[in-house]
Amino acid sequence: MTKYRFTDKDFDTFKIDGLDARMEGIKEGPRVKLYNLGDHFAGFLTDLTGDEQFSHVAMHARRKVNPPDDTWVAFSTNKRGYKMMPHFQIGLWGDHAFCMYGVIYESPDKQNMAKKWLDEFDLFREIPQEYSISLDHMKPSKPELSGLSDEELEAGLVRLRDVKKGEFLVGKVYRPGDPELKSDEAFIEDLEKVMTELMKFY
């Protein structure tokens, strides 16, 4: 069994019907790898950022009817949670995996981060343009930077600053069959490279 990389079986977990059955599939497959990734990258990010980082694996505990469409591990400097602060995430949906950094709507740091990123806007053109952004972590859509104009990117950051539900995350998307998912070593190496690149926004 692979320790870190996501396989076709992991992606296919999200085709399983029913809450209980899908949760069982997540527990047996992706969640094991998310814990392993959490163990590895909590230490890696602590060294990279200089701040102690803690991993938080999604439990989906509040779900009573609808099965989850995605799952993830997030990293923050708070032992108790991550949603209230800027954070790194590794996760997967049925058609892609991702590694991103940003803020979601629960964070009181939203306005400060938006202002910082607007002031340092050129950073978004200094990272690989095949990287993607997410403006809503609960939806799978992650358009590539290469397909976004400066005006569209700026509008996303303004929305983060001004709209209560505004969110903004940036990072890399992995599709089933991508070379980075061919081995644990390749996946870990690329994730470390992406997180190092995303430190520009930290």
Image (cartoon, rainbow, N blue to C red):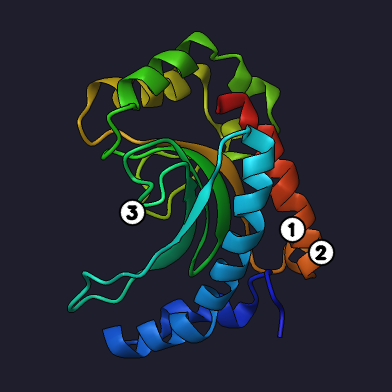
Q: Which mark is nearer the camera, 2 or 3? A: 2
- Give the residue type that dot 3 points to: Met
* Residue 201 in the image, given as x and y percentages of width and height: 56, 26
Q: Position of residue 145 (x, y in %)?
A: 58, 33
Q: Residue at x 55, y 77 (%)?
A: 32
Q: Is residue 173 above or below residue 195?
A: below
For the point 46% across and 15% down, the residue is 116
Label 3 crowd bin: few (<14), some (14–19), many (20+), radius 10 Å:
few
Are the residues at dot 1 and dot 2 in contact (C-beta closer than 8 Å)? Answer: yes
> Residue beneath label 2, please?
185
Quadrant that contains the N terminus: bottom right
Q: Amino acid at mark 2?
A: Glu
How crowded is the residue under tag 1: few (<14 C-alpha within 10 Å), some, or many (20+)? Answer: some
Whether residue 130 can be seen here = no
In the image, is 80 to the left or to the right of 169?
A: left
Q: How would you rate the neighbour count of disc 2 (Cα within 10 Å): few for under 14, some for 14-19, many for 20 or more? A: some
Q: Amino acid at mark 1?
A: Ile
For mark 3, give the secondary structure. loop
Where is residue 24, by image quadrant? bottom left
Label at residue 81: none
Nearer-N-terminus badge (3/1): 3
The residue shown at (30%, 35%) is 107
- Residue ID for mark 3: 138
The mark tally for this picture is 3
Q: In this picture, is 3 found above or below 195? A: below
Helix, strand or loop at mark 1: helix
